[in-house]
Image (tube, helix red, strand yellow):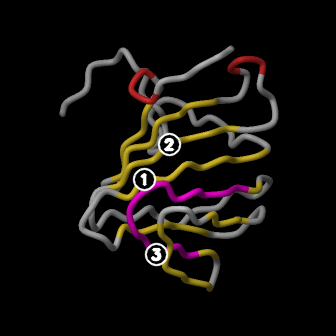
């Protein structure tokens, strides 16, 4: 059995949201997906972005948000899944008072950005300024 723990995974922080890379390309021999766990503070909002060659789902685990996919916008809450087709611009905003938590699965996996990128993940053992 192969197990990953969020707090021991590479992380990315942007716009009030912390993303833990639970499964990355090549990890455990995986070749077809990437999985992240994301926690967003109240009022946090992802910048609009897209994955030209990958489909993606967001599974809302806790909290309330507004999901934008291209020109559509919908409120989302725990227990909901949002499907994002390849190339669709998307973002999520926490509209509640509590933390918004969701799991994102991307297939095929997104390309891992290099050092210095705004989307780069920090290794789990790197010092953090928190």
Q: Which mark is residue 66?
A: 3
Crowd band around label 2 with a 10 angstrom C-alpha radius: few (<14), some (14–19), many (20+):
many
Q: Is residue 97 left or right of residue 101?
A: left
User: What residue would you read off at disc 1?
Assistant: 101
Residue farthest front in this picture: 79
Where disc 1 sits, the SS reads strand
Are the two marked residues, 2 and 3, in contact with CB atoms closer than 8 angstroms?
A: no
| Mark sitting earlier along the chain (3/1) | 3
Q: Please state which of the two labelled residues, at mark 3 or mark 1, is closer to the viewer.
A: 1
Magenta part of the chain:
56-68
User: Which one is in front, 51 or 75?
Assistant: 75
Residue positioned 50% across, 42% down in the render:
37
Are the two marked residues, 1 and 2, in contact with CB atoms closer than 8 angstroms?
A: yes
Mark 1 to mark 2 CA distance (whole Å) = 7 Å
Q: Which mark is residue 37?
A: 2
Q: Position of residue 10 (x, y in %)?
A: 47, 27
| Mark sitting earlier along the chain (2/3) | 2
Residue 60, magenta (yes or no): yes
Are the two marked residues, 3 and 1, in contact with CB atoms closer than 8 angstroms?
A: no
Name above or below for residue 4 compared with residue 130.
Answer: above
Mark 2 to mark 3 CA distance (whole Å) = 17 Å
Q: Position of residue 40 (x, y in %)?
A: 35, 55
Mark 3 to mark 1 CA distance (whole Å) = 13 Å
Q: Is residue 53 left or right of residue 67?
A: right
Q: Is residue 105 left or right of residue 108?
A: left
**Where's the C terminus, which quadrant?**
top left
**Where's the N terminus, which quadrant?**
top right
Residue positioned 55% across, 62% down in the render:
79
């Amino acid at each position: 059995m192969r197990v990953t723990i969020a707090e021991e995974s590479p992380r990315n922080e942007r716009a009030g949201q912390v993303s833990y890379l639970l499964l990355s390309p090549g990890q455990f021999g995986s070749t077809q997906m990437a999985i992240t766990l994301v926690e967003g503070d109240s009022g946090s909002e992802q910048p609009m972005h897209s994955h030209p060659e990958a489909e993606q789902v967001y599974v809302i685990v806790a909290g309330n948000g507004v999901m934008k996919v291209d020109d559509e916008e919908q409120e989302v809450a725990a227990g909901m899944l949002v499907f994002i087709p390849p190339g669709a611009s998307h973002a999520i905003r926490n509209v509640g008072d509590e933390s918004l938590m969701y799991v994102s699965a991307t297939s095929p996996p997104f390309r891992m950005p290099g050092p210095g990128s705004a989307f780069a993940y920090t290794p789990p053992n790197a010092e953090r300024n928190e």
